[in-house]
Each structure stands twice: as structure tokens, then as C-alpha cells.
Image: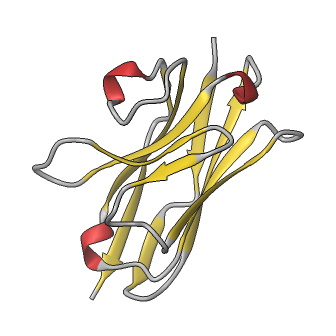
């Protein structure tokens, strides 16, 4: 079992930055593929970035968002720069056994954190 607890969401103006954290307990997230997903109001959940040592970013965030991991803290991060209003969503971290953009293949999820970008 892995428990994931997210933090770092909030309200930011367009062009600003936020860093989301996802602290894991129970097992090391190093044994899993990591992922960040998001869900905007009225839309399906979509992948933002997935991977382990190499990463796949959604085209919409490429060059602006960066995933990272601190093995010692068993925590992963999502650094979000140059934020846009269309980035507004609830963001979720997840870990799973497969390298996939499908959220169905991730076993453990954080509770979600709201990111709101004002124009």
C-alpha cells in the first residue's frame, strides 16, 4: 500500500508559478512509475506527465512543467511555470506499475489539489 498526500495548490495569476508536492508513505515510490494528472470542471481527467527515469509530458504543458522526485523524502514534485488560465484544474499525483497515460492503470492516488490560474 502507498498513501499519497498532495500539497502546494492555490490561486496564481497567469504567468506565475506553483510547485506541487506529493509525499508518499508505505512504500518507496521509486518502485513505481509516477504520474501527474489533472481534471478541469466538466472535463475528463487527463495526463500531465508520466514516467520514471524518462518522462512524457502532455503537449499542453511541455516546456512549462517539470516533474521531479526526491528519493530521500519519498516525494515527487510538479514545478509549474508560465501558468495559463487553461491550466486551472484539480491536480492529482499517482503511482502505478505501468508506463501509461491512462489513469486507469495507476494504483494509488493523492487526494487532489486545486490549482486556479486567474487571467
- Residue at image coords 69%, 31%: 24
Farthest residue, direction right:
72
Image spot of residue 16 (x, y percent)? 48, 85
- Residue at image coords 30%, 83%: 118
Query: Which quadrant of the structure image shows residue 57?
Result: bottom left
Q: Is residue 58 above or below residue 103?
A: below
Farthest residue, direction front:
54
Q: How is the image coloured?
A: secondary structure
- Residue at image coords 55%, 71%: 18
- Residue at image coords 27%, 77%: 85
Image spot of residue 96 (x, y percent)? 53, 22
Farthest residue, direction top:
1
Q: Is residue 9 left or right of residue 58?
A: right
**11 or 36: nearer the eye?**
36
Q: Is residue 4 left or right of residue 27?
A: left
**34 or 100: nearer the eye?**
100
Q: Is residue 5 left or right of residue 85?
A: right
Quarter placement of the C terminus: bottom left
Q: Is residue 98 above or below residue 35?
A: above
Quarter placement of the N terminus: top right
Q: Is residue 115 above or below residue 67?
A: below
Image spot of residue 83 (x, y percent)? 41, 78
Q: Is residue 1 above or below residue 72?
A: above
Amino acid at each position: 500500500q502507498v498513501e499519497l498526500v498532495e500539497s502546494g495548490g492555490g490561486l496564481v495569476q497567469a504567468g506565475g508559478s506553483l510547485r506541487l508536492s506529493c509525499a508518499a508513505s508505505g512504500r518507496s515510490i521509486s518502485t513505481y512509475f509516477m504520474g501527474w494528472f489533472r481534471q478541469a470542471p466538466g472535463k475528463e481527467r487527463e495526463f500531465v506527465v508520466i514516467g520514471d527515469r524518462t518522462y512524457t509530458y502532455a503537449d499542453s504543458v511541455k516546456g512549462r512543467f517539470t516533474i521531479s522526485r526526491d528519493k530521500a523524502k519519498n516525494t515527487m514534485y510538479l514545478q509549474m511555470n508560465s501558468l495559463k488560465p487553461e491550466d486551472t484544474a484539480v491536480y492529482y499525483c499517482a503511482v502505478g506499475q505501468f508506463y501509461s497515460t491512462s489513469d486507469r492503470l495507476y494504483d494509488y492516488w493523492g487526494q487532489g489539489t486545486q490549482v486556479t490560474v486567474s487571467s
